[in-house]
Each structure stands twice: as C-alpha cells, then as structure tokens.
Image (spheres, grey):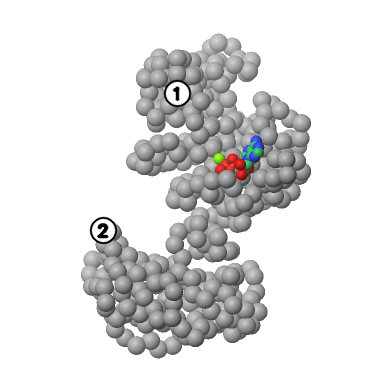
C-alpha cells in the first residue's frame, strides 16, 4: 500500500490462555472507510481497542501515521473511539457533551467554542446545542457521540458498532450520513459491524474476521464476487454450493464433474486445485437463469423442478429441487417488465449460468 495510516504486523492478543487475535497483519490506507466484519466474539472490539491503545497486543507491531504505538497511551494517539453504547452524559447539554472531548486539548475558550460549533454543524445538530442529552432521540444521541469524537480532529476514527442500537430505518439513514460525513472530513474510519449489508454499503474495504483471524480483506465487490473460502462466501450473501470433482485446470478455468449434475465449468481463485480434488462450485443465486422445460445440453446446465417461489416485489426467489442434491438451488430473478417466467411450484425447469460466475472453493 502506498500511503498506509495504520500498519498491523503479526498482532496477537491473549487473555490468559485464550487467544482472541491471531497473527493480524494488514494495512489501512489514509482516508479509507475500512470495516471489520464478523460474527459476535470473533475479536473485532479487541482489535479496535488495540488500535485505540485501551488494550496492548501480546505480540506484534502496530504503527499509526508512521509511528510505533508500543508504549503510547490512548490519550496520546491520533485516534478517537465511538462506542456501541453512546456513553454520553445525560445531565449535560449537547454542547457540554461535545466540548467534553476537548478537555485534554490546550485550547482557548474561543477556539473550543468554534470547534464545538463546527462539530455540531457536521452532525446536523444545529439549534440543539443547549438541549439536555436525555431529551434526545437515539439517533441524536449517536450524533452527539460522533461529534464528541470528531471535535478532537483525530486522524483515525474508531467506531464500534455505532448504529446497532438504532432501528432499521434510522440505521439506514445514519449509514448514508456516516459515509458522507467521512467523505467531508476525509479522515480514516475503522468501523466495526456484524451486519454484512452495512459493511458492504459503507466500506471502501472490508476485513472479514472469524475466530480471531482475518479470512479475507477486499472491496465489497471482490468479497462478494470472489470470496476466498466457504466461510466468507456464506457470510456475505447466499451461495449455492455444488459438490464436484476436479477434472482439469487451464489458467483460471477449471473443469469439474459430478455424477448428479454433470459437467460444470468454472473459475478458480488464487489456489490451484489438483485433478481429482473434491471441491465446491459456488454460484450466487442471481447469476443463475431459469428456462422452462428444456432438457440440459452441455456443461453448466441442470434440470430441476421448482419447489417454491417467493415474490419480493423487485425480484422473486425460487428454490429448485435437483435430483441427487441434498439442498434445493436458490435462484433470484429480477422482476423486470416482461422479464419473468411464470414458473410455479412443480414446474420442470432448466438452470444455467455463465462459467465466469462459477467459483471453485475448497471444501
Ligand atoms: N478482557 C477480556 N478477558 C477475557 N476474554 C476476553 C476479554 N475481552 C474479550 N475477550 C474474549 O475475546 C473474544 C473476542 O471478543 P471481542 O473482541 O469483544 O469480540 P467481538 O467484538 O467481535 O464480538 C471473545 O471470546 C471474548 O469473550
Ligand atoms: Mg464487539
């Protein structure tokens, strides 16, 4: 990476004999909106606390803005943290809560005031400065927490599931605001979430974590289109998995076979499979097309029978049973004008897809 602001190298964190983080090594770019995504307990908060200086790694190196952070306490780091619970003072006003972030900064009263005004404006709380924090809605409280962190002008803002307490509609609104706020201020955001849709919507890049390890770091599109393992594929969206045996590989292309569904052509990721390996061909539901009735000819075609159809307005979800497969195949079709087939439960159909959309994943 050209200009990283955060560099983690071999970072490990143990709590007694339990290893919460294992060999964490990656960089975060200056100005990136970077997310840590993973199920509860996978180590996201622990990693964020290490960046903040609230926890110390048991091994490995961390530099922020080119400086080693070993021995640098939280209040001397160019970071600020927004917590999952807002941690604001209910008896103080919005303005008092926000300017509290500046107590350790040696500013004149006028400077502190103008910075506080600026932060209030940034999070769209203008006119509410004198209101007491306990009179605010959940969304407004989270804005106060954001402003209190931003008022210190950190180089890196660390956000630990800051939107998880909000209901769905407000959360989606705040996601858009958070993204545009990040673009406006231009500082690096490290954002923790267990919500894959939230991570995909917001991030420049995402690190998918599991059991204290990073499984894959990529852009939202690359994570979705080219997951490097089953766990990432399953975590980010739905994936159909066809068990197959590899017959041959040429460049990126892999030819595989299954006694149940015939020959399947797909593409590999970085790993080169051996002939005879049993792997999965993984195909996203929206990459499969359905045609009524025809018999399969050639590779990447499977005959099946519609088990169920769910109408979701803009699209319909089909589950298609295929002889010899334990799980029905999921197919999502967009309900374009005139573009739908009216298959209903019981209809015989043929499924097909482009080989570029079938990805080989190790079992
Ligand atoms: N202070 C601690 N002492 C012992 N175990 C801890 C401590 N903090 C976190 N853990 C454990 O480390 C693991 C990761 O926790 P955490 O980073 O909070 O996960 P996440 O934020 O992804 O839900 C969990 O199993 C948790 O129980
Ligand atoms: Mg957490």
Marks 1 and 2: which is nearer the front? Answer: 2
Q: Is residue 264 left or right of residue 16?
A: left
Disc 1 on helix, strand or loop?
A: helix
Q: Is residue 348 left or right of residue 2?
A: left
Please report whichever mark, 1 or 2, sits nearer to the chain's N-terminal start: 1
Q: Residue at x 39, y 31 (%)?
A: 139
Residue 111 location (% of width, % of height): 55, 15
Disc 2 on helix, strand or loop?
A: loop
Q: Is residue 330 left or right of residue 218?
A: left
The residue singled out by tag 1 in the image is: 120
Q: Residue at x 60, y 70 (%)?
A: 362
Q: Tell me where residue 166 sits by quadrant.
A: top left
The residue singled out by tag 2 in the image is: 313
Q: Is residue 39 left or right of residue 51?
A: left
Residue 349 location (% of width, % of height): 31, 80
Q: Residue at x 47, y 51 (%)?
A: 196
């Amino acid at each position: 990476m050209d200009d990283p602001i955060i560099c983690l190298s071999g970072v490990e964190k143990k709590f007694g004999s339990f290893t919460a983080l294992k060999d964490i090594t990656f960089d975060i770019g200056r100005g990136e909106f970077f997310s840590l995504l993973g199920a509860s307990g996978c180590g996201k908060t622990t990693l964020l606390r290490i960046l903040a200086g609230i926890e110390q790694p048991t091994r490995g190196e961390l530099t922020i803005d080119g400086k080693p952070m070993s021995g640098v306490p939280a209040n001397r780091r160019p970071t600020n943290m927004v917590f999952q619970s807002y941690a604001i003072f209910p008896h103080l006003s919005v303005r008092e809560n926000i300017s509290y972030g500046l107590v350790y900064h040696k500013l004149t009263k006028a400077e502190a005031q103008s910075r506080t005004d600026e932060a209030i404006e940034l999070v769209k709380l203008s006119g509410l400065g004198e209101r007491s924090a306990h009179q605010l809605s959940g969304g407004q409280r989270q804005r106060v927490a954001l402003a209190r962190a931003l008022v210190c002008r950190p180089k890196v803002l660390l956000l630990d599931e800051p939107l998880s307490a909000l209901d769905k509609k407000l959360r989606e609104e705040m996601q858009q605001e958070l993204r545009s706020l990040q673009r406006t201020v231009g500082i690096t955001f490290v954002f923790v979430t267990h919500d894959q849709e939230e991570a995909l919507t917001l991030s420049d890049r995402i690190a998918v974590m599991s059991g204290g390890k990073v499984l894959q770091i990529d852009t939202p599109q690359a994570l979705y289109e080219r997951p490097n393992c089953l766990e990432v594929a399953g975590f980010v969206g739905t994936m159909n998995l066809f068990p197959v045996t590899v017959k041959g590989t040429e460049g990126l292309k892999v030819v595989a076979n299954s006694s149940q569904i015939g020959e399947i052509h797909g593409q590999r990721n970085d790993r080169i499979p051996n002939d005879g390996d049993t792997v999965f061909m993984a195909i996203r539901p929206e990459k499969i097309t359905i045609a009524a009735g025809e018999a399969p000819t050639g590779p990447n075609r499977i005959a099946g029978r519609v088990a169920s159809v769910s109408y979701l307005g803009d699209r319909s979800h089909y589950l298609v049973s295929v002889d010899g497969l334990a799980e029905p195949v999921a197919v999502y079709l967009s309900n374009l004008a005139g573009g739908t087939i009216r298959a209903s439960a019981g209809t015989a159909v043929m499924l097909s897809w482009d080989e570029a959309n079938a990805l080989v994943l190790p079992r």
